[in-house]
Amino acid sequence: MPLQCAFKALLLSVFLWFCQQGLANDTYDLEEFREHYKKNDKPPLKKPQKRARSSTTSPFENIRIGFFGLNLTDDDVSGDERLETYNDFVVHEQGFLNLLNFYSYYVNIGGPQDRHGRIQNALNLILRIFTVNMTTETSPENKQKIHAMAKRLFEQLFLSATINGESNPYYHYFNSGLSENPSDSTHINHGLVMMFFAFLGPHLFTGYDDYFDHASVLIRRFTHQHYHQALSDSRLSDNIGEYNTPEHFANQLIAAGLDAETALLITLCALAHASYFCMNINDVSWQETLEELLKRFVPSHFILVAYNNMNILCTGSSGTVPDSIFYSMNEFTENLMGIEIQNSLSRKKPKAANLTDASTQYSDSDWRSKFEDHNEEIEQEAGAVGGATEESHECKVCSGSPPYKAIIENVRSLDICENCCRKMGICETCIERAFKE
C-alpha cells in the first residue's frame, strides 16, 4: 500500500511538472489567444485602428519588428516557440499595424475582471520586442544601417507632404503649433503614431529636449482626440470634478474603455525614453520588467497634460489643477493598469496653479524625476566632461528650449547643482545668473 501511494504521488508530481512546463512555455498565453478567436470569430469590443490603405482585420497576422518576430499563423508551433529572433533587422509600417491589431484583439479576451491582466500581458510582450531589439548584438556598421532605416521610415510618415500622390495627414504631426483637430484628423491613426515614435524616434533624437517635445505633442494630441470622442459618445463624464484625483481619473478612463489605449501610450512613451537613454548614454542597463520600466521612465507630465485637455473639453478653458493631481503619475498608472510602481522620489506638492501649457510649464517635474533617476549615468555621457560654455557650445537656455528654461528658473526648488547644469549644456552665464537670483 505505501508503495502504491508513493507511485501515485510520483505520477501526480510528473503530471504537475508537465503542466508547469506547459504554462512556462507559453509566457504570454498565445495559445489561449489563438483558441479564443478560433472559436469566436467576432471582432473585438473596439475594432483596431488602421490606416485606410491597410486591410488588416484578422487577429492572426504575423509580426516582424526589427530583430523580433511573432508567428501567429502556424499550427505546428505553440507558446513561446512562436517568439522568434532574426539576424537581420527589418522594419516597416505593416509590422506596426499588425502589432496594434494584435494588441486590440488581445486585451479584449475575457471579461472585465481579467482586463488588467490582459493589458499587462500584452505590454510585457511589447517590452519583449524592445528587449530583443535593444540587446541583440550587431556590428557598428549594422547599427548605422538601422539608424538610417529608422530615420527614413520616420521621415516618410511625418516629413513627406504626400504619400503615393495623396495628401499625407501625418505631415508635420509633431509640429506643436498645429491645431488639435486638423481638417484631415479623422484619417490619423494615433496608435500608429505611437508605434513610430516609440520604435523609431530614439534613432532620430539628437537631444533629450527633442524626445520631450515629441512626447508632449503626442500625449496632448492623443488625449485630446480620444477624450473629445468619448465625451461626444457620453462614455466620459463632462463634470471636471470627476477627474480631481488620480484614482477618479483612472476609473473614468477604465469605464470609458480608454484604459488599454492609454496604458499603451504611457508604456510606449516610457519605452521610447528608455531606448533614448540606452542609445545615447554609456552603461545604462536595459529595463527588462514592466514595473522597473514604468518606475524609471514613466512620462510624469502625462497626467498634467491629460487633465488640462479634459479641463478644456469640460469647461472650455484651462483652470486650476487640484493639488492631488500634481506629481501623481505613478498613482494614476497603478490605478489604470493594476500594477504597483514604487515611487523612489519624495516630493512636495506645489500650490494649485493655472495650467496654460502643461507640456512646457511643468516640464521641470519630468526633468527632476529623470535627472535624479539617471544622475549616475549622465556622469558618463559623451562630451559631458568639462561642461558647456558660451564659446564652445550653444546654450540650451539661451537658445530658448522650454524644458531647460524651466529648469534654470527653478534650480533651487529642484535641488539641481551647478555642475549638473553644466552637464545639461547650460552656459556659465545662465548658471551664474540663476544661482545669484
Image (cartoon, rainbow, N blue to C red):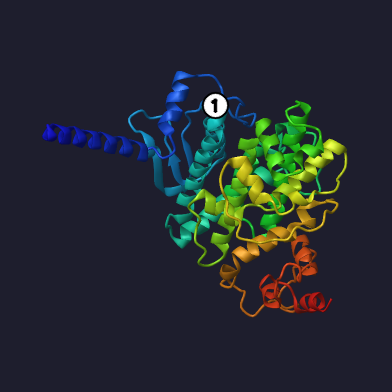
Which residue is the extreme one toward the right? Answer: 316
Q: Amino acid at mark 1?
A: Gly
Nearest the eye: 424 or 143: 424
Quarter holding residue 22? top left
Residue holding disc 1: 111
Q: How many marks overall?
A: 1
341 versus 224 height, above or below: below
Looking at the image, can residue 84 be seen? yes
Question: In the image, is 184 to the left or to the right of 62?
Answer: right
Where's the C terminus, which quadrant?
A: bottom right
249 versus 297 height, above or below: above
Residue 172 percent across, percent down from the top left: 74, 46
Nearest the eye: 145 or 397: 397
Residue 408 percent across, percent down from the top left: 77, 69
Residue 51 percent across, percent down from the top left: 64, 32
Residue at 52% x, 53% y: name it.
146
Residue 223 percent across, percent down from the top left: 72, 40
Residue at 88% x, 42% y: name it.
317
Nearest the eye: 121 or 283: 121
Question: In the image, is 401 to the left or to the right of 287?
Answer: right
Question: In the image, is 12 to the left or to the right of 231?
Answer: left
Quarter holding residue 244? top right
123 versus 33 height, above or below: below
244 versus 44 height, above or below: below
Residue at 36% x, 28% y: name it.
75
Where's the N terminus, which quadrant?
A: top left
For the residue labelled by badge 1, is the local secondary structure a helix, a strand or a loop? loop
